[in-house]
Image: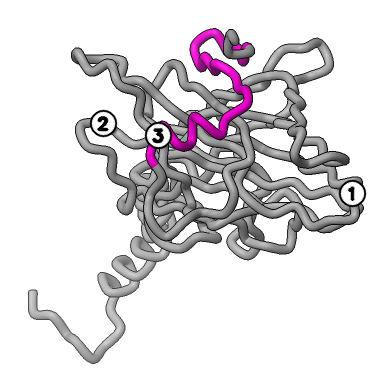
Amino acid sequence: MRIRWREVTWYSRLIAAGLFVLLPFIGFWLGIQYARSLGPLAMQVVEHPSQDGSATNGTSQSTSSFNEPPKTVLGKTVVAIPGTHEFVMKTLPGVTFTVEAAGRLSGGVPVPACGAGSFFYLPDPDDSRKLGSCIDTRKLSLPGETPGIAYAVLRIDNKSNGYVNGRFLQLFWNSEHGEALESSLADNIPRRDSYGALPFSSRRTVIGFLVPAGQEQIQLVFGEYGKAPGIAETQETLLGKSVGGWIVNFVQKTMSDIPG
């Protein structure tokens, strides 16, 4: 049978009708396969314990759109620690610090508001208009370990007439495999020089720390560490400025005072 290219025939009509029916189904199937290859678009966690005292952990779908940044911390796996923890410092009268939430993130996810790639996301709880911090998982490196993030939501209530500005939380972690006994000081993620609150005001901020993704326990310590210097401070210097802290266990979901 000779094909007549410039003439409408019975078989050209049949081919057109078949494509009209099949193409939407083929496109739908391809879209499903692509979505599955991306994984979940976003995972979110409620940062505060529920009324019965239990923590809300896990993987409910985020409601953020492509134009709106997420409102919660994001990661493929999120472990939240219930409860709040308050501390003060003698050198800063009239100022109260409260760790409103703490947790651990592992496994980045696609976050549409951050762009292409896999990200951890730390919001700015003090200003919902800001995007917050998009942390590209490809740029995180922790020798010998899969990188993750421990985070703390810190509220600073400043009832004094002075501006509070500095760093007030540090994190240490011990390797949970091998024979290494020394504690490692966690880098701030994202890096920041300082954070604080204006006179007679209250401010909340999310502070992230680079830790191994599967780390079961860390030490979160507090003190008046000042602004970040041009060169790295030694662990001994930072520990010398610490006045207290907590042992955070992500398996037991507890945050207990460090003895002594």
x and y percent of residue 50 in the render? 78, 19
Category of crowding for the residue at label 1, using alpha-carbon neighbours closer than 10 angstroms: few (below 14), some (14–19), many (at least 20): some
Direction from residue 126 to residue 235 in the image, left or right: left
Direction from residue 16 to residue 59 in the image, left or right: right
Q: Quadrant of residue 37?
A: top left
x and y percent of residue 130 in the render? 68, 62
* Residue type marked 2: Glu
Residue at the disc numbered 1: 160
The residue located at (75%, 52%) in the rendering is: 164
Q: Is residue 176 magenta?
A: no
Element type where label 2 sits in the image: loop
Using the image, determine if residue 113 lies above or below residue 8. Answer: above
Q: Which residues are magenta?
A: 234-256
Res 145 label: 2
Mark closer to the chain start, 3 or 1: 1
Res 2 label: none
* Residue type marked 3: Gln
Marks 3/2: CA distance?
Answer: 20 Å
The residue located at (35%, 52%) in the rendering is: 30
Category of crowding for the residue at label 2, using alpha-carbon neighbours closer than 10 angstroms: few (below 14), some (14–19), many (at least 20): few
The residue located at (70%, 39%) in the rendering is: 154
- Residue 29 in view here: no
Direction from residue 6 to residue 244 in the image, left or right: right
Residue at the disc numbered 3: 235
x and y percent of residue 223 in the render? 62, 35
* Residue type marked 1: Ser
Outermost residue, left side: 1
Element type where label 1 sits in the image: loop
